[in-house]
Image: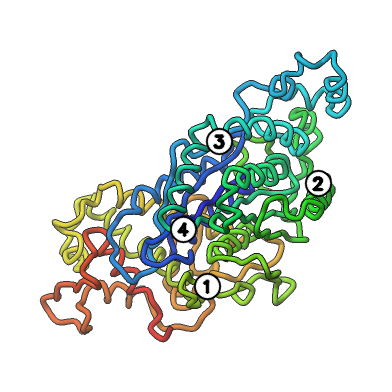
Amino acid sequence: MGYYFISIGGSGTRVLESLTHLAVAGMLPNKEKDGQLYTMAIDPDTGNGNLTRTNTLLTHVNAFKNVKVGENTPLLKTPLTLPNPFTWSPTQIGINLDRVIFYHNYKDKPIGKLYKTLYTKKERETILDEGFRGRPSIGAAVMGMKATTDVVQNNAWANLINSVQNDVKTHGFAYIFLSGSVFGGTGAAGLPTIARILRDTFKSYCDAGKVKIGGALLLPYFEFKPTPEEREKCGLFASSENFLTNSKAALRYYADTGGSGYDSLYFVGDDTMTPTNNFSVGAGSQRNDVHVVDFFAAMAAVHFYRGIDGKHCYFISRNQGDRFGWQDLPDITMSDETKVSARERFGQFVRFIFAYLYIVKPVIRDLFAGGNSHAHPWFKDYWKDKIDINSAEVRNFEQYAEQFVLWLNQVENSSGRKVELIDPKSFKCDNDAISINPDFFPTLDYATSKITLNDVAAKLSRGEGGGFPWPWPKPKKTSGSEEGFGLFLRRLYDSCKIENH
């Protein structure tokens, strides 16, 4: 089966960032690598910092996605497909709205005069390299013209269409999920336009129920307050003061059009506006932190991917008005209709990542510095003469693990309300420097357990039967299909499971 995710604009990219972590953690509905997560980004501002950060994350995951961790494990069970090109831009470098719509061909005609009335001179002449500046009207004009032609001419679209068609022929169906904001420029313009084009492109499949289209529409949840100097310098830019007005107009449009091409829609937002780190029009300086709203929107994609019949209305709300917690998240329904606790699965994955950074990373650093591997029995059992510690998969996994913790830190500190998913006392991020606190490892997801980092290290260094005989027994394989680095990751992941679950 195919899970397709299309991020639209900066907010959609942050949702994709969250969904990628959920996929690596095994929280998508598929079983035993019978599904793939295909990603694509739509953004005129191809150099924006959030898109760069997410692209880096996807590159890391893509580098270790094929490690052999064996069967009957949620770890890495949803392979990532990272197409080339990953990003489609509806604009070209150095182009403005006048050039996009060929205004010079119509300026003396009635339609040209209408266009000049609808758009200000600044809106028409602003270069669109850094996005649509919070103007859905600009985005709608550009998307409407470029997307229709590029679907048949652009490689990014061709790759997506071919993959969906192959999935339908092979597995019988495919799920396409879009996400972006309805209060900015790119998302507000792209969400209805792209959904309509996808439905037209896959009309026969959609009519037969073989292709489903869903979307997470992000309502306002952050704000920024540029200084007078920044306002003067930046010219045309997205304004927080217009977010609610833009959202109201967008929601009325979706109501009037019956969903505008979607089979399922999820509306996710927060009535507490979180200030952004810094004000930016776009490009590399637009590098906003992930918000818990982005996490919830990614969970909406997980819900959609399980297969939705479109006959029900779902809603979710907080148990307590001043905080978010595990009790606010539903269980995950897998493809075989079994239920999985989001807290249990995510909590085990966090322990796995923390254990890797606390136990494994220092050993790798020590060995690079000429240390003795005999001081680390698990290294002798799993790695020595089996795994190249400088291999691409090992290096990329370590970078991924660090990026995951930085993402987690942003989620936990993102809202004006308290977020209680992972105890912030269990880890610390000082800029990009990460430290794990072993004292809070047993209760890092606010559940009571007795598992410690010492327990995890001990499990790595003994056989399935337990005990500490000497010499150390060779580790046993779990299913017979684990190999190399994958065998070690599987053993570490299994060692992080709370036994009473």
Circle 1 crowding by C-alpha within 10 Å: few under 14, some 14–19, many from 20: many
Residue 500 in picture, x, y percent from top left? 41, 86
277 versus 357 height, above or below: above
The answer to which of 306 and 276 lies nearer the viewer is 306
Q: Amino acid at mark 1?
A: Thr
Instruction: Give the amino acid at mark 4.
Output: Gly
Q: Which residue is mark 2?
A: 246
**x%, y% of residue 450?**
41, 83
Query: In the rendered view, does 357 fall on the left or right side of 265?
Result: left
Q: Position of residue 232 (x, y in %)?
A: 79, 29
Q: How far is disc 2 from disc 3 in space, using C-alphas?
A: 24 Å
Q: Quadrant of residue 493?
A: bottom left
Instruction: Name the residue rendered at 19%, 51% in the picture.
Output: 370
379 lies left or right of 298? left
At label 4, counting other C-alpha atoms closer than 10 Å, the crowd grade (few under 14, some 14-19, many 20 or more) is some
Rendered image quadrant of residue 325: bottom right
The residue at the point 72 percent across, 59 percent down is: 269
> Spatial distance from mark 1 to mark 2, Cα to Cα?
34 Å
Numbered disc in front, either 3 or 4: 4
First in sequence: mark 1 vs mark 3: 3
SS label for mark 3: strand
Q: Nearer the viewer, residue 282 or 182?
A: 182
| Residue behind mark 3 | 88
Give percent across and percent down for residue 254: 77, 52
| Residue tagged 1 | 333
